[in-house]
Amino acid sequence: MAATTRDTSSNYIGELFMIGANQTPFLQMIGGVGGANAMATLSPVFPMCQTWTPTAGAIPALTETASMTAIAADTIARAQVLNTVQIFQRYVTVSDFRQADKGTLAGLSATGNQPVLDEFGFQKLAQLKRMANDMNLAFLTGTYAAPETVGTAAQTNGIITGCTVNTVSAVGAKVTKAMIDALFLEMANNGAPFENIKIFCNGFNKGVLTDIYGYAPESRTVGGANITRIITNFCEADVVFDPTIPASTILVADMNHIKPVFMPINGMGVEYTDTAKTAGARNGLLQCFAGINYDHASYHGTLTSTAVA
């Protein structure tokens, strides 16, 4: 039986962010081209930001005499906000018989180029796409769990889960412009920088946003609208359809403050390993340890409990 081997060129981090990008746009956008936006950590739990609470403004009333007297020191306390990477794995297995079968399509003999000439390569990319789907969902909706023991499954805290500072509830109603305005106002009041704002939503709410902001010129032959960017009082924001967004949620995310975080395996973000051959089958393992860093929660916002139909 063949031993487990590692191909040092099998770093699939770039492919992870690009494969099936239309199904995982959030993951693709935070990863950048070829995973260039990714961060590395040397331990599973990592700090995202340090928080502190500023006091309300006050107008000083100091006399010249008072200004010559030392005032009491005021130390500002800080707290770290932590997140963790978690284990993502996908297994690849193909029988030698299936790998050798390159001349059939739907059970019939075929000629010319085939859709799949390398079954194992196809299965590897298909499992990588599944891993991307898993990661996209975890980065959006995961709930934090630290790997305190070897028997504890680490879970990264998703950005939607972490958006507890700026959130507006639709209370089951269909989204309105007033709700969107209220969310952006809350973000502004809580110090959001509004640097690179994207609005992520599912298919239904994408249609609702187009109905709210859409304006199509009158025409006898062309109709409809597809809103991909809106202007608010505080910023311009791109509208992005992501099928992984929960049906009753809209996420407003500042992409300048979001990065995927990897704990490298043998120097690689996403490692592929040929595992031991079992009888008449070739096997392999795709694996990575990844989490999300979305910086301070006040930089983002959510509109929750929206109508879903």
Image: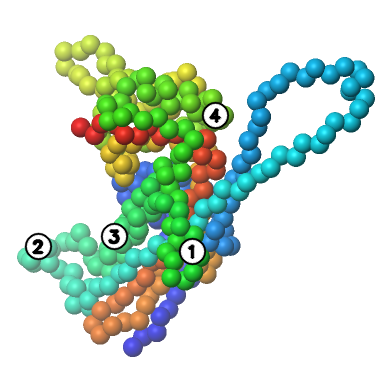
Marks 2, 3: nearer the viewer: 3
Is 236 situated left or right of 98 in this image? right
Which residue is at the front of the view, 215 or 53? 53
Residue 275, image x, y percentages: 37, 77
Q: Which residue is mark 1?
A: 147
Which residue is at the front of the view, 285 or 76? 76
Q: Is residue 142 above or below residue 222?
A: below
User: Which quadrant holds residue 223?
Assistant: top left
Specify which label sits upstream in the sequence, 2 or 3.
Answer: 2
Gap between marks 1 and 3 measured at Cα: 28 Å
Q: Which residue is mark 3?
A: 126
Specify which label sits upstream in the sequence, 1 or 3.
Answer: 3
Residue drawn 84% across the image and 19% down it:
62
Gap between marks 2 and 3 measured at Cα: 19 Å
User: Which quadrant holds residue 10?
Assistant: bottom left
Gap between marks 1 and 2 measured at Cα: 46 Å
Residue drawn 20% across the image and 13% down it:
219
The crowd level at tag 2 (other Cα within 10 Å; few <14, some 14-19, many 20+) is: few
Gap between marks 4 and 1 measured at Cα: 32 Å
Residues at discs 4 and 2 in contact (Cβ within 8 Å):
no
Gap between marks 4 and 2 measured at Cα: 58 Å
Specify which label sits upstream in the sequence, 4 or 2.
Answer: 2
Which residue is at the front of the view, 111 or 235? 235
Amino acid under label 1? Pro
Q: Secondary structure at mark 3?
A: helix
Marks 1, 2: nearer the viewer: 1
Q: Which mark is residue 106?
A: 2
Q: Which residue is mark 4?
A: 190
Amino acid under label 3? Ala
